Each structure stands twice: as structure tokens, then as C-alpha cells.
Image (spheres, rainbow, N blue to C red):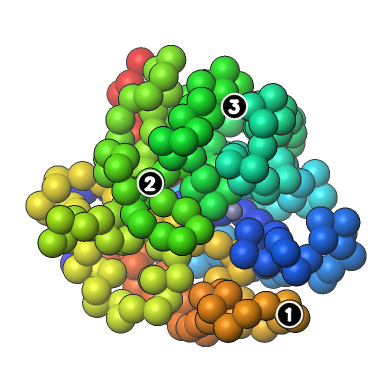
Amino acid sequence: MSESLVNALTIDVEDYFQVSAFAPHIPRADWDTLPCRLERNIDLILGFLSEADVKATFFTLGWVAERYPHLIRRIVADGHEVASHGYAHYRATEQSQERFLTDIQLAKAILEDISGEEVRGYRAPSFSIGASNAWAFDAIAQAGYRYSSSVYPIRHDHYGAPEFPRFAHEIASGLLELPVTTVRLLRVNWPAGGGGYFRLMPYRLARWSLRRVNRQDRQPAIFYFHPWELDPDQPRVPGTNAKTRFRHYVNLCRMEKRIRQLLSDFRWDRMDQVFLEGRA
Ligand SMILES: [Zn+2]
């Protein structure tokens, strides 16, 4: 039974070897030599989105778009929104202001060139924007983006800004920040918008959390996942510690079924349709 509010479905388009937690184990110079799983995984995603008649937003790396332009064109042809995940998956926290701006401008230009459409949304790698680098919002507005979805207002050892507002708010120069969804319980923000938690915890809990956001907060949810999360057969990255391995590989084989269930339990659309429609 579908809820009445329309939520935003988002996919961060990067391959398994570009995940931030693997950065110490995989030199960037090796990216071009590793087996690519994106074509297989995007194919799968476009297939079940089409079956469910759902449109989504694909936050895509400029690096990926340059190498697989046909994937970008297929995403656009299917009616989805192409948005930016930056060029080379550097966290905002590890870049100077100048390098950050250059990276997000480059990604926007590449994605617009290939998609033939204006790219209005940006998501920072690993939700790496918070109070300590709020200058990044000015750069995102300066680069010409209309919205950002770069904050996950939770406490986490790799990311998170629990002090940030949980829902859509205007930041600088008209830029909208659209934080990934959390559920508020016992005065703590809990992740409800995707990530390892979604694979680890029972599906019923995820559904309960999103329903609570729709019904109690009366807000649309923003949910995200990665193509590699649907790929139990991806090559294993050697040398990682137990925590990183657990977070990356737990329940990959259950993910497709869970996402399909999510698509049928809630209503979904692209970020721009949910949040920019009706705004000047
Ligand atoms: Zn990413």
C-alpha cells in the first residue's frame, strides 16, 4: 500500500573501487585497470526502475561519465535526472576551496555535455560537508548548482553532521540543501536514508522509519544506494580490515529484493521533481 507523499530516490554512480573506505587500499592510478562492474549494475537498476515505473536521480562522477558516456545517455533516455557527484570522488574535507570548486565545475561541464541537460544537483562524496567546511555550499552555488544533497545529519565515524537541520533548507545564494533522511528517536537522529544500515537491519525497520518521516514529520524522504550494493559478485578488495569488509559486503545478496520492496511500498520520483518543482 503506497503512502501519499512522494519521496526522492537517488543513486550514487561510482564503482566498487572508488568507495572512500577503500581509498587507502586502491591507488587512484589503478582505477583504469580494475574490472568495471558499472555497466552490469546500471543495467540492473534501470531494468527494475522501469518495471516499477519509478524515475530517480543519478549522482554521477565526472570520471565515470567520461569513460561510460553511453550509460549517461541511457539514464537520460529513460527519463531519470543526471546530477553530479564531483569529478574524482575526493571528499570535500580533503580539498582546498579552489580544488573543490574546480572539481565540481569540471563534473558539471562533463555531465551537461554528455547528457545534453542542465545538471542542477550535487552530492559530496561521503557526505563530507558539515559545519567545519560550510564554505563548500558557496562553491556549489558559485558553480551553478541549484541544490545539494551533501549532508547526512547523523553521527558516524566517517561522515555525518548531526547538528544540521534534518530537512530541506536554503543555505546560500538560493542553494537548497536536501539532507539524506534520518528518523528522530530518543533525541537522536538515526540513519533512515540508506547506507550499510539498510542492508544490515531488518527491512521492516527501514519501512517503519520512512513511514514515520512521511506521516509524523510530514516530509518527503531522500533515500540513496550505490550500484555496487546490488552486486554480490564484485571483485573483493584485498588488505581491508574486518569493519570495512563487513560494512561493504554485508547482505549484498539481499539488496535487490529490498530495493524492489521499497519501490513498491512507497512513492518515488527524481530529486528535482520532488523539491524544485514549483520553486522559482
Ligand atoms: Zn560516493
In this view, the residue farthest toward the left is 216
- Three-letter amino acid code of the residue under disc 2: Ala
Identify which residue is drawn at 12% across, 53% down. 215
Q: Is residue 280 above or below residue 176?
A: above
Is residue 40 in sight in this rendering?
Answer: yes
- Badge 2 local density, few (<14 within 10 Å), some, or many (20+)? many
Residue on which the image places disc 1: 239
User: Do tag 2 and tag 3 residues touch (Cβ < 8 Å)?
Assistant: no
* Residue assigned mark 2: 161
Instruction: Identify the residue at horizontal 62%, vertical 64% (top origin).
Output: 21
Depth order, front residue of 34/156? 156
Specify the amino acid type for callout 3: Glu
The disc, 3 or 1, on the residue closer to the chain's N-terminal end is 3
Residue at x-position 51% and y-position 25%: 135
Label 3 SS: loop
User: Helix, strand, or loop for circle 1?
Assistant: loop
User: Circle 3 is placed at which residue position?
Assistant: 118
Percent across and percent down for residue 132 are 46, 36
Q: Measuring 64% from the left and 61% from the top, which residue is drawn there?
A: 19
Q: Is residue 75 left or right of residue 11?
A: right
Task: Identify the amino acid type marked 1.
Answer: Gly
Q: Does the residue at mark 3 contact the one at mark 1 (Cβ under 8 Å)?
A: no
Q: CA distance from mark 3 to mark 1?
A: 40 Å
Judge by depth and name the residue closer to the eye, 280 or 16. 16
Work out which quarter of the rendered image holds the N terminus and state it: bottom left
Q: Residues within 10 Å of mark 3 (few under 14, many from 20)?
A: some
Quadrant of the image containing the C terminus: top left
